[in-house]
């Protein structure tokens, strides 16, 4: 009798478990059948009255029914949980095409970028990066660089004068003298920075622009060394092998002085509009450091020699990005700046 | 400086290089050429023609002329020139020839078909005469006498700064002769100057300022236009033909780089030329019709009455050559370069003469110039006669010591091998004197025209040999250098990191000028007098050097505000602060700004975030606003106990919308930045956290409350952080509740709940002691 009651109970409970429409109904079945005061517990309580041989048999049946129901229940619960999770996840749909909140990264000025790139390049070649002031003494800017007062070479650099023997530096070359005094020979240094010329501003002229001075002083520095250094440097800057040539150029702080041209990167030599049909593009002035300048830096020109060059960063930036108006670089216009 | 190819060709025997090749050679070996242009190509077709008839064309000022153009036959042309009359020989331009960029055609003028044209000096590029057609002497059909198509090579003046000799054609011809291995022709014949006593006396006050003064006197002078070929020469190199006498002086200058001046001898007082400093109050009216007040520093040429020329710069009007001039004094002098330069910049008068003298001309050249002039004057002023011989006063000639040039040193500098024979031959081609004083050692003497300033040391000779042997023959060679890391530049590293942080936070980098207008200084409450000022600014609005980056970023905000509703900008630049003496202080600053057009709460906290990223743990302390700052949104930025900058919102009078600015001193930040890090053991025992809320006045500073809470928390306080604040019911008006989360822990054990409770109680009690109500 108890046996059939148990079987009926198990069968109906199983049916109800399988038919439960949701977790609440399932829980109701669990409490009713498997709970502490549930139907199976009731049966279990009645076991004491049974004969010993029945007790063992019914007990076994009871356990089997309980395990079965629990398994069915668990499986059903998992299914409900799975469905609930799926439903939740589905409800959590978001539009991934909406823009991310918060600011986008800003940009570094193209002059900063090229300057940092060159600083890294030179540093990797063992070259020190030095600074010099934007306001210089007339002496450092000219006299110490072998350009005495009333020297016609002063015409080459229209100067902003500040009184008291001061001026806005017209080139980064004064850092040569500062660098020699600071580092002593042998030395390799660059000095990027802002320079000033008293010139009207138009699409290709600026009164404020950027240069990178470079200098090497050692015991036996030759034109051949300078050529190697410049060629290596320029090949890195332009990302490909470049052909360079030297021709005479006059700068009082070097002797001999050169203009360094690179073979036109656009036409490769035969001549085009960019190189004005010459096949060459004038890139930078350079030369062997004049003995008077070495002396100004406290270096004995009989023992040491060196080369120096001045790279126009502004011009390089314009070449690299194809910028056709120099004024963009310092007019603070975001429509220009955010492109970098 | 313009060079005529024909002129150079005349001075270099057998020059074959084409104008384009010559330009390339000069560029590679000597000086930078800016271009070469054909000049006077039309002279291949223009011919002399005799005017046979010239009938007025009714109803116009033109004439219908019939000319005999030799082999070209008779041509009928219409000519408007007043001097078009039968009998003259003039220039006939056949149809199809280009003049001044226009093609001459067969065209109908005033109803008459003109078959080509008759041309004047300006049209042909011979001189600047627009008055009429040329008149000269030649056979009809012949080319214009001694006038040929030419090319003009333009050389960059800057690259001639150190070469006084290259300011004349002969100097360039000397280079070309050396480069091409041709023979140089000497145009001056010193034998033309008679050895007789001079007809004029010269007195030089200071032989340093005037190392040489040479002069000749001529009589029986005819003043008239120069022959066309001479005018054409001058015109081709950019000099204005004036009259035969003046043209000769300019011709010699353009050829030998020796400036000269001709005085009308009959207009001079006394028989002595004085070279002296100007006297106080002296003035002179110069050839350009300007009157100059002379300072005693200026050197003048004077007669007994006063100045007749500003030495080396310009001649005086009163003694100028005119149509009536019959006798002349021809000056060929040498002046101190720097002094001429000073005079010319003081007078703001740069002339062809001053440009040459300031390059340090060769005193030897004065007599050479006169010799050449004698010959040319005889050509252009028939019947002219020298009176007496050379007047010549000079400082003792300085012969610079020869330069010792060791071959091994030279080879080390060049970085390529070169033989002694080649070195000798190069130097000799440039007219250096070369003797071998020992094995592999040359003693090199410098020609006078290179010795004034250009060449004095052996390094100068490296250039001479290098350029002639060809820099292209030097193989790039890696220098042998120590492999060691370069000295560090912590400042640049720091600035780079700051830039990186700002741009990562969304700020775009701008570069602003270092200049500021007085108006902008005042606008930002700064006295113009407190700035370093530019003595010669480009314009008045760029007369000061910035001592703050604020005006620059303000301008950026306003200008970009026209295009964008919101944006972030920053700049790293130098503030320039005036000092009593010496160089000004240059202080690197970072300035960053956020602009938002909407007037909601504003981006102050966003900007503050940048401050915190740059300076972890920095604090803001409210401060009195300057006139351009929002009175209740202005603070100093404190870091590690120091004020390092300012954070403020722009006053609405300055910016429409909201703009918040962070302005910090990078040098101070760098000095305060922590160096090095040390590992702290990771805590093994759990920490405890609890929240506290303080009821405070609405304008109480959360930062102050936080510090006060922390001050009562004792040694176990790990951290304290702001959670939120609340205003409104049920709180009293003018009050707010500010909540903080405190975390406490001990390094060596877990704090018991009693201990944590005790800490909490102590804080509450402490705060109540300060008069705060605690909401617990």
Image (cartoon, rainbow, N blue to C red):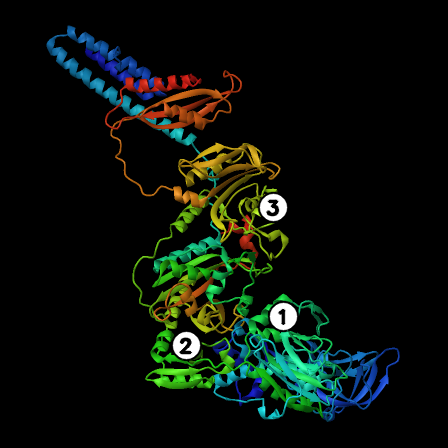
Question: Looking at the image, is A38 positioned above or below residue A332?
Answer: above
Residue ID for mark 2? B458
Q: Secondary structure at mark 1?
A: loop
Which label's residue is closer to the chain start, 3 or 1? 1
Marks 1 and 2 on same chain = yes
On the image, the x and y values in percent for residue A15 come to: 30, 19
Of B236 and B588, nearer the camera is: B588
Residue B189 appears anywhere in the view = no
Q: Chain of mark 3?
A: B
Question: Looking at the image, is B202 positioned above or below residue B70?
Answer: above
Residue neighbourhood size for the residue with mark 3, other residues' Cα within 10 Å, grouped as few (<14), some (14–19), many (≥20): some
Residue neighbourhood size for the residue with mark 1, other residues' Cα within 10 Å, grouped as few (<14), some (14–19), many (≥20): many
On the image, the x and y values in percent for residue B758 come to: 31, 18
Measure how far apart labels 3 and 1 are at the Cα level.
41 Å
On the image, the x and y values in percent for residue B750 come to: 25, 24
Residue ID for mark 1? B298
Q: Quadrant of residue A96?
A: top left
Residue occupying the point 41% across, 56% down: A130
Of B199 and B675, nearer the camera is: B199
* Horizontal arrangement in the rendering, residue B205 relative to residue A269 (left or right): right
Measure how far apart labels 1 and 2 are at the Cα level.
35 Å
Which label's residue is closer to the chain start, 2 or 3? 2
Residue ID for mark 3? B520
Question: Looking at the image, is A294 positioned above or below residue A91?
Answer: below
Q: Secondary structure at mark 3?
A: helix
């Amino acid at each position: 009798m108890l046996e059939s009651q148990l079987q009926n109970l198990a069968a109906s409970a199983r049916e109800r478990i399988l038919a439960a429409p949701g977790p609440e109904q399932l829980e109701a079945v669990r409490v009713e059948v498997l709970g502490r005061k549930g139907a199976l517990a009731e049966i279990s309580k009645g076991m004491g009255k049974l004969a010993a041989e029945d007790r063992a048999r019914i007990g076994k049946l009871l356990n089997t029914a309980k395990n079965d129901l629990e398994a069915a229940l668990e499986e059903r619960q998992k299914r409900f949980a799975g469905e609930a999770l799926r439903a939740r996840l589905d409800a959590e749909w978001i539009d991934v095409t909406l823009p991310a909140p918060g600011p986008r990264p800003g940009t570094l000025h193209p002059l900063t970028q090229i300057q940092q790139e060159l600083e890294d390049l030179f540093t990797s070649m063992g070259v020190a990066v030095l600074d010099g002031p934007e306001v210089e003494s007339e002496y450092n800017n000219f006299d110490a660089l072998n350009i005495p007062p009333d020297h016609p070479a002063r015409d080459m650099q229209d100067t902003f004068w500040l009184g008291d023997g001061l001026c806005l530096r017209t080139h980064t070359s004064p850092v040569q003298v500062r660098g020699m005094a600071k580092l002593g020979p042998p030395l390799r240094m660059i000095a990027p920075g802002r320079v000033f010329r008293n010139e009207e501003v138009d699409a290709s002229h600026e009164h404020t622009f950027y240069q990178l001075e470079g200098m090497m002083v050692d015991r036996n520095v030759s034109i051949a060394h300078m050529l190697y250094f410049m060629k290596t440097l320029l090949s890195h800057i332009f990302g490909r092998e470049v052909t360079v040539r030297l021709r005479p150029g006059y700068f009082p702080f070097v002797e001999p002085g050169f203009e360094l041209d690179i073979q036109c990167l656009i036409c490769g030599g035969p001549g085009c509009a960019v190189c004005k049909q010459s096949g060459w593009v004038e890139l930078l002035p350079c030369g062997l450091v004049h003995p008077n300048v070495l002396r100004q830096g406290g270096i004995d020109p009989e023992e040491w020699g060196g080369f120096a060059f001045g790279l126009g960063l502004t011009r390089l930036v314009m070449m690299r990005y194809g910028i056709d108006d120099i004024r963009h670089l310092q007019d603070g216009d975001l429509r220009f700046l955010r492109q970098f | 400086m313009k060079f005529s190819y024909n002129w150079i060709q005349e001075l270099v025997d057998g020059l074959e290089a084409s104008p384009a090749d010559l330009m390339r050679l000069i560029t590679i070996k000597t000086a930078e050429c800016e271009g070469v242009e054909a000049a006077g190509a039309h002279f291949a077709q223009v011919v002399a023609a005799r005017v046979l008839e010239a009938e007025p064309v009714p109803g116009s000022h033109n004439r219908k002329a019939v000319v005999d153009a030799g082999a070209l036959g008779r041509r009928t042309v219409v000519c408007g020139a007043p001097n078009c009359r039968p009998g003259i020989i003039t220039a006939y331009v056949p149809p199809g020839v280009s003049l001044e960029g226009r093609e001459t055609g067969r065209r109908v003028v005033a109803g008459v078909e003109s078959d080509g044209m008759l041309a004047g000096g300006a049209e042909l590029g011979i001189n600047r005469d627009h008055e009429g057609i040329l008149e000269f002497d030649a056979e009809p059909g012949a080319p214009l006498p001694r006038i040929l198509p030419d090319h003009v090579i333009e050389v960059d003046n800057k690259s001639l700064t150190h070469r006084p000799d290259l300011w004349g054609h002969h100097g360039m011809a000397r280079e070309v002769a050396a480069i091409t291995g041709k023979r140089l022709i000497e145009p001056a014949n010193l034998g033309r100057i008679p050895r007789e006593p001079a007809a004029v006396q010269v007195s030089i006050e200071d032989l340093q300022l005037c190392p040489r003064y040479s002069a000749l006197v001529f009589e029986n002078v005819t003043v008239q236009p120069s022959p066309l070929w001479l005018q054409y020469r001058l015109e081709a190199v950019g000099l204005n033909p004036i009259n035969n006498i003046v043209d000769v002086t300019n011709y010699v200058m353009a050829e030998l780089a020796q400036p000269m001046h001709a005085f009308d001898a009959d207009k001079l007082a006394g028989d002595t030329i004085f070279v002296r400093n100007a006297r106080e109050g002296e003035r002179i009216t110069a050839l350009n019709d300007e009157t100059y007040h002379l300072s005693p520093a200026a050197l003048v040429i004077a007669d007994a009455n006063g100045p007749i020329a500003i030495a080396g710069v310009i001649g005086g009007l009163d003694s100028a050559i005119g149509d009536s001039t019959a006798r002349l004094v021809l000056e060929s002098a040498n002046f101190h370069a720097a002094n001429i330069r000073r005079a010319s910049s003081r007078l703001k008068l740069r002339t062809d003469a001053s440009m040459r003298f300031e390059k340090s001309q060769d005193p030897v050249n004065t007599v050479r110039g006169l010799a050449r002039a004698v010959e040319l004057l005889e050509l252009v002023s028939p019947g002219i006669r020298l009176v007496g011989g050379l007047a010549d006063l000079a400082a003792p000639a300085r012969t610079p010591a020869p330069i010792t040039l060791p071959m091994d040193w030279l080879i080390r500098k060049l970085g390529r091998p070169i033989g002694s024979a080649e070195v000798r031959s190069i130097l000799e081609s440039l007219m250096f004197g070369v003797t071998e004083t020992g094995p592999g050692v040359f003693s090199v003497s410098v020609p006078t025209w290179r010795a004034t300033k250009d060449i004095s040391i052996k390094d100068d000779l490296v250039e001479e040999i290098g350029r002639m042997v060809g820099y292209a023959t030097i193989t790039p060679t890696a220098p042998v250098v120590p492999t060691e890391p370069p000295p560090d530049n912590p400042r640049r590293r720091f600035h780079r990191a700051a830039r990186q942080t700002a741009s990562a936070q969304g700020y775009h980098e701008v570069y602003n000028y270092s200049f500021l207008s007085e108006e902008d200084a005042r606008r930002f409450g700064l006295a113009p007098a407190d700035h370093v000022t530019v003595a010669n600014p480009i314009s008045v609005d760029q007369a000061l050097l910035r001592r703050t980056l604020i005006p620059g970023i303000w301008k950026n905000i306003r200008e970009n505000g026209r295009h964008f509703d919101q944006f972030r900008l920053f700049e790293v630049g130098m503030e320039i602060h005036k000092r009593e003496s010496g160089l000004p202080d240059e202080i690197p600053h970072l300035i960053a700004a956020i602009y938002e057009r909407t007037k909601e709460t504003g981006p102050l906290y966003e900007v503050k975030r940048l401050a915190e990223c740059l300076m972890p743990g920095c604090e803001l302390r409210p401060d009195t606003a300057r006139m351009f700052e929002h009175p209740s949104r202005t603070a100093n930025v404190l870091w590690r106990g120091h004020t390092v900058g300012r954070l403020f919102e722009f006053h609405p009078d300055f910016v429409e919308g909201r703009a918040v600015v962070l302005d910090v001193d990078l040098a101070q930040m760098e000095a305060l930045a922590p160096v090095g890090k040390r590992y702290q053991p990771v805590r093994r025992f759990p920490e405890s956290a609890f929240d506290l809320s303080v009821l405070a006045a609405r304008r109480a500073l959360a930062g102050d409350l936080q510090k006060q809470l922390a001050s009562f928390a004792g040694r176990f306080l790990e951290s304290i952080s702001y959670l939120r604040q609340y205003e409104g019911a049920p709180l009293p008006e003018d009050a707010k509740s500010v909540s903080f989360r405190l975390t406490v822990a001990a390094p060596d054990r877990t704090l018991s709940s009693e201990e944590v409770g005790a800490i909490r109680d102590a804080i509450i009690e402490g705060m109540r002691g300060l008069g705060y109500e605690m909401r617990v």
